[in-house]
Image: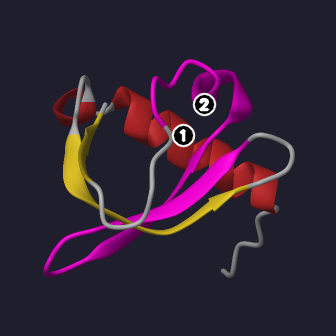
Amino acid sequence: MERVLSVFQLNEYVRRTLAADPMLKGIRLRGEISNFKHHSAGHLYFSLKDEEARIACVMFRSSAQSLKMMPRDGMRVVLS
């Protein structure tokens, strides 16, 4: 049987699944920032990449406001 989910339902499922995974508690990611965009609403959009993979990221305005420096393409970072 084919199951059709809304975008919200899929996001909630993924959020709950990741939040319940003990391996992902306190995880930190290391990589290089690319495709950085600072949206007029204050959100930050970028990719985090390494030699083998890339993941799309967003930092919402509420978190971005506390940054001591603005990220930029090419920065090597550890995210928590």
Left or right of 5 on screen, residue 66: left
Considering depth in this image, is 18 or 62 the residue closer to the camera? 62
**Label 1 amino acid?**
Arg
Q: Nearer the viewer, mark 1 or mark 2?
A: 2
In the picture, residue 36 is in which quadrant? bottom right
- Residue 54 place in picture, x, y as percent: 33, 74
Please give the name of the residue rendered at 64% of the width and 23% of the height, measured from the top-left corner.
65
Q: Mark 1 to mark 2: distance in Å?
A: 21 Å
**Label 2 amino acid?**
Ala
Lower sequence index among marks 1 and 2 = 1
- Residue 29 place in picture, x, y as percent: 23, 46
- The quadrant of the picture occupied by the C terminus is top left
Q: Is residue 34 above or below residue 21?
A: below
Left or right of 19 on screen, residue 10: right
The residue segment tinted magenta is 43-69
Q: Is residue 58 above or below residue 35?
A: above
Please name the residue that numbered disc 2 is placed on: 64
Please give the name of the residue rendered at 25% of the width and 35% of the height, measured from the top-left corner.
24
Please name the residue that numbered disc 1 is placed on: 15
Considering depth in this image, is 5 or 70 the residue closer to the camera? 70
Q: Is residue 22 magenta?
A: no
Left or right of 73 on screen, residue 70: right
How many residues crowd around disc 1 within 10 Å: few (fewer than 14), some, or many (20 or more)?
A: few
Q: Secondary structure at mark 2?
A: helix
Please give the name of the residue rendered at 22% of the width and 33% of the height, measured from the top-left corner.
27
In the picture, residue 47 is in which quadrant? bottom left
- The quadrant of the picture occupied by the N terminus is bottom right
